[in-house]
Image (cartoon, coloured by chain):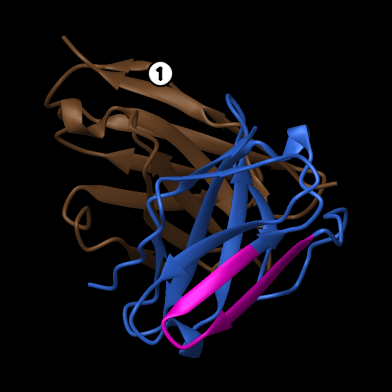
Chain colours: A blue, B brown
């Protein structure tokens, strides 16, 4: 089965840039989606198809995908960005979703 | 604005069947894929399966023998059943819209398996 690997935690100071990685075998050939989840809330889609932002998601949040790593980048980090972030791909061979283990973003 | 709401028992006994319903409002259940996802206490997310409004389904192979998803277009609802539950099925269960990703999610409902 396809495996996605994320770092358990990332810490960043306010105003700096946070990067969260999602590793998978040839993930660059797949479309990657990213979700933000705050405590007690459902996940919210913040990036779809590698780099598209749904309506209402700030331009500070962006995504990229190449080779064996997809990356979520959050510029000018704010306290409100503190959350868990999950990557997800659709596995076309089995027609099902695969999630990464999640990364806790801490704003120092 | 599309909204989804899960409903069902919060406590299920081991070996029994977990049953949840997701009610869709603010839009039609037709012409979309509808998905169930669960999140374990340790925070990991697991895709359970989807149903298309026409009735086609696909399930996570790890759960396939115990899971069934159905849809009632007249009520704008779709449902999940998981049979022979154990403590390992304790999780927050979410319903969502989408086949390749989830652009709308319900708030989630905690289901605990315990005697």
Q: Position of residue A71 (x, y in %)?
A: 57, 69
Residue at the disc numbered 1 = B9
The quadrant of the picture occupied by the C terminus of chain B is top left
Q: Is residue B52 left or right of residue B74?
A: left
Asked whether residue A59 is drawn in magenta, I would say: no
Q: Residue B100 is drawn in which quadrant?
A: bottom right
Against A77, residue A74 (above or below) is below
Q: Is residue A38 left or right of residue B113?
A: right
| Neighbourhood count class around disc 1 (C-alpha, 10 Å): few under 14, some 14–19, many 20 upward | few
Q: Position of residue B96 (x, y in %)?
A: 58, 50
Q: Chain of mark 1?
A: B
Query: In the depicted view, which residue is nearer to us: A40 or B50?
Result: A40
Query: In the depicted view, which residue is nearer to us: A3 or B12?
Result: A3
Main secondary-structure element of the magenta-colored stretch: strand
Query: In the depicted view, which residue is nearer to us: A54 or B31?
Result: A54
Against A32, residue A41 (above or below) is above
Query: In the depicted view, which residue is nearer to us: A37 or A64?
Result: A64
Res A14 visible: yes
Q: Position of residue A6 (x, y in %)?
A: 41, 58
Asked whether residue A66 is drawn in magenta, I would say: yes
Q: Residue B87 is drawn in which quadrant?
A: top left
The magenta stretch is: A61-72
């Amino acid at each position: 089965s396809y495996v996605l690997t994320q770092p358990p935690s990332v810490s960043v100071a306010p105003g700096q840039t946070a990067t969260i990685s999602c590793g998978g075998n040839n993930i660059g050939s797949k479309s990657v989606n990213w979700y933000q989840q705050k405590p007690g809330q459902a996940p919210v889609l913040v990036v779809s198809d590698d780099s598209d932002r749904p309506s209402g998601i700030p331009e500070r949040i962006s995504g990229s995908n190449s080779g064996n790593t997809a990356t979520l980048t959050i510029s000018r980090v704010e306290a409100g960005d503190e959350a868990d972030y999950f990557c997800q791909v659709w596995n076309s061979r089995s027609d099902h979703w695969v999630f990464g283990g999640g990364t806790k973003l801490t704003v120092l | 604005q599309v909204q989804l709401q899960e409903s069902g028992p919060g406590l299920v006994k081991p070996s029994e069947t977990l049953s949840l319903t997701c009610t869709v409002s603010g839009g039609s259940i037709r012409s979309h894929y509808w998905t169930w996802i669960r999140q374990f206490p340790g925070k990991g997310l697991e895709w359970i399966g989807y149903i298309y409004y026409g009735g086609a389904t696909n399930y996570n192979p790890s759960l396939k023998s115990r899971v069934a998803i159905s849809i009632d277009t007249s009520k704008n609802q779709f449902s999940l059943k998981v049979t022979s539950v154990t403590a390992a099925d304790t999780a927050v269960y979410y319903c969502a819209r989408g086949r390749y990703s989830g652009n709308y999610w319900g708030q989630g409902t905690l289901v605990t398996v315990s005697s």
